[in-house]
Image (cartoon, coloured by chain):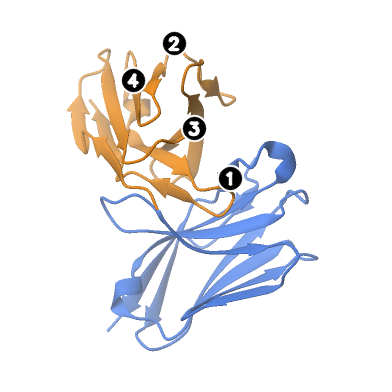
Chain colours: A orange, B blue
């Protein structure tokens, strides 16, 4: 199993500002994933972060809006840029243990006013 | 287009009875299915999975049934306990999509005393 620490756990932000979410894993992992869960919606994959290369973004998500850093095998950040109320969501970091399962952080509850 | 559908946003079940959570999928390429459980302010945690070569997988009180012809799976919890109150996400993956996991919107299960 993997222990994932994610912070902040929640934040309230003004529109037009940016928030950086940090994710720390207790073991080295090749890929880290960032998900978003909008109210009443499913968990949606934003991007896959590989160490040493640019993140791979899913359809509908772009690097300018959600820049990701992956400086080493245990850490990643996701920035939500130029926020609007539509960005109010839970953002989740996760790592894979193969097809069997994903391990998730506790999430960041973001509210944009 | 929602490839994994959980049509019941919520479900209430008496403690000690069986809880049945349903999930439908549209992509016939999905070959691995998972259930995750999420408590408030926590990340989802893996519960149980099933490969498409099986039609049933059991783990303690939890059993997942897969009906490939109907593109339907269900999670049975018996007997239901108060600690089972949570949101349950159905998820699926396919080898030809790089094992990316697609989630449903979740079903909130309430276990009544």
CA gap, disc 2 to disc 1?
24 Å
Q: Is residue A18 left or right of residue A76?
A: left
Q: Give the residue at mark 2.
A: A64
Marks 4 and 2 belong to one chain: yes
Do the dots labelled 4 and 3 sit on one chain?
A: yes
- Chain for numbered disc 2: A
Q: Are marks 4 and 1 on the same chain?
A: no
Q: Is residue A11 left or right of residue B25?
A: left
Are dots 2 and 1 in contact, CB under 8 Å?
no
Q: Residue at x 47, y 17 (%)?
A: A52
Neighbourhood count class around disc 1 (C-alpha, 10 Å): few under 14, some 14–19, many 20 upward? many
The first of marks 4 and 3 along the sequence is 3
Are the residues flagged by discs 3 and 2 in contact, CB closer than 8 Å? Answer: no
In primary-sequence order, the first of circles 4 and 2 is 2
What residue is disc 4 on?
Answer: A79
Q: State the residue lying farthest toward the front.
A: A28
Mark 3 vs mark 2, CA separation in Å = 23 Å
State the separation of the CA atoms marked 4 and 3.
Answer: 20 Å
Residue A3 drawn at (x, y percent): 32, 47
Q: Residue at x 78, y 51 (%)?
A: B28
Element type at marker 2?
A: loop
- Residue holding disc 3: A30
Subunit that carries the residue with mark 1: B
Q: On residue B102, which mark appears? A: 1
Q: Compute the Cα span from label 4 to label 1.
A: 23 Å
Would you place residue A43 above or below residue A101 in this image? above
Using the rendered view, name the quadrant where residue B98 is placed: top right
């Amino acid at each position: 199993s993997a222990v994932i620490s994610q912070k902040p756990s929640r934040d309230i932000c003004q529109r037009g500002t940016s928030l950086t979410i940090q994710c720390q894993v207790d073991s080295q992992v090749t890929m880290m994933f960032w998900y978003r869960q909008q109210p009443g919606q499913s968990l949606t994959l934003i991007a896959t972060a590989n160490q040493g290369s640019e993140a791979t973004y899913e359809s509908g998500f772009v690097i300018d809006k959600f820049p990701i850093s992956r400086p080493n095998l245990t850490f990643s950040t996701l920035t939500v840029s130029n926020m609007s109320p539509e960005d109010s969501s839970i953002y989740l970091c996760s790592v894979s243990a193969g097809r069997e399962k994903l391990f998730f952080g506790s999430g960041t509850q973001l509210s944009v006013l | 287009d929602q490839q994994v559908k959980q049509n019941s946003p919520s479900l209430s079940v008496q403690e000690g009875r069986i809880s049945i959570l349903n999930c439908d999928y549209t992509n016939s390429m999905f070959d691995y299915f998972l259930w995750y459980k999420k408590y408030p302010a926590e990340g989802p945690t893996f519960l149980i999975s099933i490969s498409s070569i099986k039609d049933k997988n059991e783990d303690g009180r939890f059993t997942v049934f897969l009906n490939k012809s109907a593109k339907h799976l269900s999670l049975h919890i018996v007997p239901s306990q108060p600690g089972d109150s949570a949101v349950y996400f159905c998820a699926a993956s396919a080898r030809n999509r790089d094992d990316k996991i697609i989630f449903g919107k979740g079903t909130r299960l309430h276990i009544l005393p």
